[in-house]
Amino acid sequence: MSRQFILEVGNKKILFMHGHEIDPYNQGDDPPKGQAVAIIAAGVEDVVGGSRLKGDRETVENRLHNMAERVMTVVKLPFKGVSRVFKFFTNGSSQSPSQSNNLHSHHIQSTALLKEKCLNTDNEFDYVVMGHTHYPGQLKWYNNTGSWAGKVPTFLEIDLEKDGKPAFRYYEWKDGRACLMEDPALKV
């Protein structure tokens, strides 16, 4: 993964980041177990060619999280804090925190604070583009690419409008071709 960076597109600055940097599941001093699980999951996903093992309904990342939780319980290492955060952001669902639609709200709030903090600095930006939640969509200046590894892979294209502003278009990969998404607005 690349570190976050700002790219000037037309007359606007866009902050590009993965999104894990502001996910509470991936933060902490312990080191973040979510980060370790995500790194291992990414390696497994590369080998198996997707976010799920063949015929499996559960994601590789979620299986690894559950396995890590069981191992930590057996060896009695502190994992309760991460578990509480996991359950809070997924509302007790079987999705990993990075796949929780509720995480969009957290990302929007966190990037809004970051945007405000960066005003009038070299790090000032107009838009943010990230992934991490596995759900595509946009809300004003916030753009989430979704996931290339889901059942229906999604991606984002950035073009320039005549006035020099970037235009964000969302696509789903269906039946071997890119299909423009009708309404990429987030429902948060």
Image (spheres, helix red, strand yellow):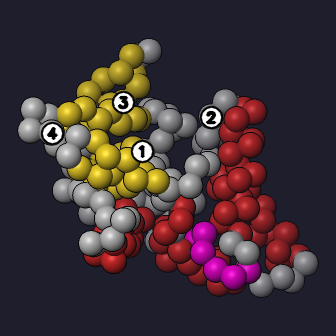
Residue drawn 67% across and 63% down?
35
Residue drawn 42% across and 44% down?
146
Tag in front: 1 or 4: 4
Tag 3 or tag 2, which sits nearer the N-term?
Answer: 2
Which mark identifies residue 172?
3
Question: Disc 1 to disc 3, how far (Cα)?
Answer: 9 Å
| Count of residue discs | 4
Question: Disc 2 to disc 4, how far (Cα)?
Answer: 37 Å
Question: Disc 1 to disc 4, how far (Cα)?
Answer: 25 Å
* Residue marked by disc 1: 146
* Residue marked by disc 4: 164
From the top left corner, tell me how far across and down residue 175 is, in percent. Answer: 41, 16
Task: Evaluate if marks 1 and 3 touch, with contact meaning CB atoms under 8 Å apart.
Answer: no
Which amino acid lies under the numbered mark 3 shown in the image of this protein?
Glu
Q: Secondary structure at mark 3?
A: strand
Residue drawn 53% across and 74% down?
24
Q: Secondary structure at mark 1?
A: loop
Q: Is residue 49 magenta?
A: no
- In the figure, 88 relative to 154: above or below? below
Q: Is residue 150 left or right of residue 62?
A: left
Question: Disc 2 to disc 1, how far (Cα)?
Answer: 14 Å
Tag 4 or tag 1, which sits nearer the N-term?
Answer: 1
